[in-house]
Image (spheres, rainbow, N blue to C red):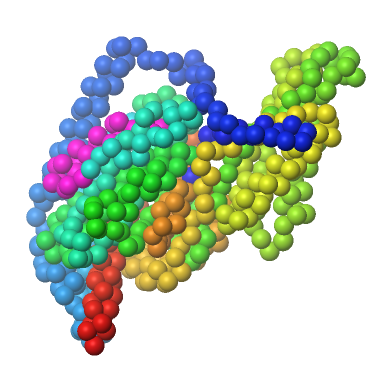
Amino acid sequence: MRISFIFIACIIAAQDYCCSSLPFARPKKSADEQQPSENDVDQQEKEQEQEKTAVRGATSKVSQSKEDFAESPTVESFFQSSGLDSSNLETISVSLKDTLHQMANTPEMHDFLQATRRSLHRNPELMYELPFTSETISTILDELDISYTSGWAKNTRQDVYPGPGGYGIVAHIGTQSEDEPCIILRADMDALPIKEATKNIEDFRSHAPGQMHACGHDGHVTMLLGAAALLKKVEKEIVGTVRLVFQPAEEGGAGMKRMVEEGVVSAVPNLKAELAFGMHVWPTLPTGVIASRPGPLMAAAEMFTITLHGKGGHAAMPHLTIDPIVAASSLVSNLQSIVSRTISPLESGVVSVTALSAGDAFNVIPASATLKGTIRALSTEMLMSLRDKVEHMAKTTASLHGCNCTILYSPDFYPPTVNDADLFEWSTGVGKLVSREGKVRDVVPTMGGEDFSFLAEVVPSTFFFIGQGSGGDEKYHIPRTDYGLHHPSFALDEEVLPIGVELHANLALRALKKLASEESEEVTKAEL
């Protein structure tokens, strides 16, 4: 989900404009968010080391646990099942589903998932600055003996976002053979600049003032690490490679775009990923429900800041001023006509003004007024069309009132998240194996944005929503889990963690088998 980190400037006068970049400025910290003392820092570092030790111990236990069902030939039989009749194929498929379900729900896995997720929740980090989160992931991968590379998602826009970045991690499980298929599983890592208000989580409440995991990314990372632990146990039977992508800066920083630019699709030479899968917890769906849709699932998104520049003066002498507040009021109303009167009623679009600020005195007409807002659409083409219309409306409204205006955009607008139609049909067959309903719900698109979209632009992909909204019981001091994403009282239903592990693992193994079978058929046809 995106937040408003907004920039790239376009100065618009009455008749022309030009573009330039603008430096990022952190908001001033409130009194309870000032820099901690040395004692506080020492205490925090001590607690983090204790948490790392606990997570490492839980990882060791889940890694060393010996389950009879994990050592069965189920996975090997699954990959060798080509050519069998439909009844035998169905039997092996069900056996694989049951095996993965059991592996995702052992006591050791439960303890690992809970310890990992709660440690990440206590230590939320923002955007491109994720040292603790990245170190936690690498520590777990080391304990599981999974190969990986670090240094991904370098921040190429430090004039806009703070920190050098480079905290992304890409890991591999399987053969890493260029002659066998490769697929991507992805999880986003970053938290949000929101002060946590969630009740009944005193044991793992955020230790970072003004920051919290209010979008479930701590759960996403944990699910993928759980899937990594599970898949590592059956690695010798896997035909192909599972690429695990841990991605920073989803919350507005286009971290996935940076990783795509860095070559994550071909992170190993001559081993290009052919399919990709992602998922997001969804509090408006009951826990255990899996949902998605073919085509556009999430919107393209752009953010804007419009500053109207007038001429300030005494409030008693408005005729000597150029009042930007009157211009801003007119612009807010005018912008509402864009969607209602300039695009087809059958198209989807949003133009929302979400903040308006000007002046700070009763008797002064300010020199400027600022509007902030967002533009959303289900196609890039419509997004660009709406952006052009917003720009034109701002320019003409400013000119009408004798003002100039400056428009600021985000450095990287997010394209829509589009599920590949052919892959989606296959993916729903996997999703229903894991869903507690035994099906994948078809949902209408949401106008929220998601930077998995950058990966889906270059690799056929499916993105799922995993319901988590029916957990919790305040009577027994268990937090409600139906608060919306980005809400200060958002709480993750931890019952969803093994479901995410199962979904990741099933998608990975079944996608590799699908690709291997398709390649085998192509070879056979070529030989004939």
Residue at the spot x=72%, y=35% of the render?
16
Residue 38 point in image, percent of width and height:
31, 11
Residue at the spot x=57%, y=54% of the render?
380
Could one spot residue 217 in this view of the protein?
no
Q: In this view, does 83 lie above or below 502?
A: below
Residue 425 point in image, percent of width and height:
42, 72
Q: Is residue 515 above or below residue 363?
A: below
Residue at the spot x=42%, y=24% of the render?
209
User: What is the total number of numbered labels drawn onto the structure image?
Assistant: 0
Quadrant showing the C terminus? bottom left
Horizontal placement of 460 versus 109: left or right?
Answer: right
Residue 22 point in image, percent of width and height:
55, 28
Residue 82 point in image, percent of width and height:
20, 79
Asked if residue 370 is among those painted magenta in the image, a careful observer would answer no
Could one spot residue 272 in this view of the protein?
yes
Residue 165 placement: quadrant: top left
Magenta span of residues: 125-148
Residue 474 placement: quadrant: top left
